[in-house]
Image (spheres, helix red, strand yellow):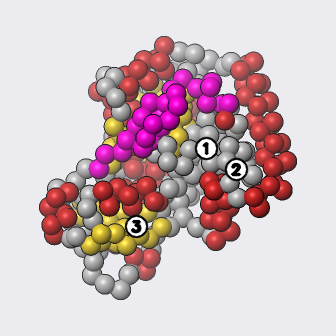
Amino acid sequence: MADWARRIEQGWYRGSPWLTPLRPLGWLVGRVARRRLARFREQAPVPPVPVLVVGNVTVGGTGKTPLVIALARRATERGLNVVVISRGYGADGGDYPISVTADDDPARVGDEPLLIARRAAVPVVLDPRRDRALERALREHGADLVISDDGLQHYALPRSAEVVVIDADRGLGNGRCLPAGPLREPASRLEAVDFLLANGGPWPGATTMTLEPADPIRLSDGESLTADGFLARFPRVHGVAGIGHPRRFFRTLEALGLAVTPHAFADHHAFQPADLAFGDDLPVIMTEKDAVKCQGFNDPRLWTLPVRASLPPGTLDAILDRALAGP
């Protein structure tokens, strides 16, 4: 992440006074966002099939992707024909919309869509215009449930239900809209969604979601070790995270007992082998989102730590039932 972007982000969450001159712009962004939402509610378009939007009100990562995977897998278990649609941040796929397959190039389709296609085993359609992605999901994949990865503020997309994920650690920062704060919309937007989930801890009015680590997997050969087995073999590691909140991943590694040298990269960083040359032979363990871009490096030092979204019993079904019930 560029130094200026990191400084601004830190200012949002530390209440830095030097952001004060940006408050009028933040107020304007919030006012425009309220008007857009009001117009959307007046039109109240009805989607052709149930559409579930999983989004957030802050910039940066909050843990949406593991939740999208969990919802898609649970919906499939229930016999639904699920398609995930996404903007495809970081993708260079040419003409949109495009469909993602499990063996696609992450440089073409982006890291998160590829991860969803692999982990959830459902079709994924990319288009910055999610209404066109919805049309492709219906026309080519016969979807009877569409899950939108992000897109809360994309009001061209009709929806049946909305889920918002917030990071319980960072919360809403200073509570101001961009660029004075991290909010895409005013905090009052949270009152209008169907489900509010807090990743990593309690939050007023939210259901707590946690990301539970699975067994580490080596990228070069697929070898898997239990967490205890990995710790016994590799007590010291390099931790790599190119996500919206890298510290969350490093804390997960530390909770496993590992001594971690952290290496934070910008969200959606396009990794090259030189990025992971740290001058020693210690193993390098990274997020799944980063791993899909490093799979072809053929480096036995590289491992990934999969995580899954853990929620109170019945929460996934409750979310799906609300979406299936319609607007």
> Label 3 vs label 1: CA separation?
25 Å
Asked if residue 209 lies in the magenta stretch, the reply is yes
Q: Mark 2 near mark 1, Cβ–Cβ under 8 Å?
A: yes
What is the three-letter code of the residue carrying label 2?
Gly
Who's the residue at 53% across and 15% down the image?
Answer: 326
Q: Going from the N terminus, do you reach mark 3 or mark 2 first?
A: 2
Who's the residue at 44% across and 71% down the image?
Answer: 263
Eyeballing the image, is 171 above or below 196?
Answer: below
Per the image, the residue denoted by label 2 is: 181
What is the three-letter code of the residue carrying label 3?
Val
Mark 2, Cα crowd under 10 Å, few <14 / some 14-19 / many 20+, is: many
- Res 133 → quadrant: top right
Who's the residue at 16% across and 58% down the image?
Answer: 228
Per the image, the residue denoted by label 1 is: 172
Whole-percent x, y for residue 6 in the image: 62, 65
For discs 3 and 2, the disc positioned in front in the rendered view: 2
